[in-house]
Amino acid sequence: MRKEDNGVPDDRLLRSYLLGATSPEEAAHVEALGIAEDNVAERLCAIENDLVDAYVRNELAGQDLERFKLLYLSVAKRRRKVEFAAFLHLLTSSAPSVKS
């Protein structure tokens, strides 16, 4: 199991967990820490947001893209999160820039 020095999973493991690419033992460990440790829960949330943003910006590829589509988008609540992120991306990418 990939961990930082303090025994907490590293960001690669947390990303793999969110994409369903961890062993059952690793997933159980991440889930338990996500409940028990606020810092792990916060990191999971931040990494999830990064994954959603990467998907919306077409920056996911290969197995990460396939896993995201298959697993993440299979949940209605998560699809709504992606739709909202896509809407925000559209607004920010089409908004005129302000010059000082």
Image (cartoon, rainbow, N blue to C red):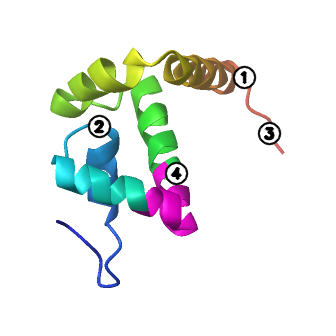
Q: CA distance from mark 4 to mark 2?
A: 14 Å
10 Å crowding of disc 2: few (<14), some (14-19), many (20+): many
Label 1: state its secondary structure: loop
Label 4: state its secondary structure: helix
Q: Position of residue 10 (x, y in %)?
A: 31, 66
Label 3: state its secondary structure: loop
Label 2: state its secondary structure: loop
Q: Is residue 89 above or below residue 64?
A: above
Q: Residue at x 55, y 21 (%)?
A: 77
Name the residue beneath numbered marker 2: 19
User: Amino acid under label 3?
Assistant: Lys
Name the residue beneath numbered marker 1: 95
Marks counted in the figure total 4
User: Amino acid under label 2?
Assistant: Leu
Q: Are marks 2 and 1 in contact (CB under 8 Å)?
A: no
Q: Earlier in the sequence, mark 4 or mark 2?
A: 2
Residue nearer the viewer, 57 or 67: 67
The disc label shown at residue 87, or none? none
Residue nearer the viewer, 51 or 24: 24
Name the residue beneath numbered marker 3: 99
Q: Residue at x 50, y 17 (%)?
A: 79
**Secondary structure mostly seen in the magenta stretch:** helix
Q: Position of residue 35 (x, y in %)?
A: 50, 57
Q: Nearer the viewer, mark 1 or mark 3?
A: 1
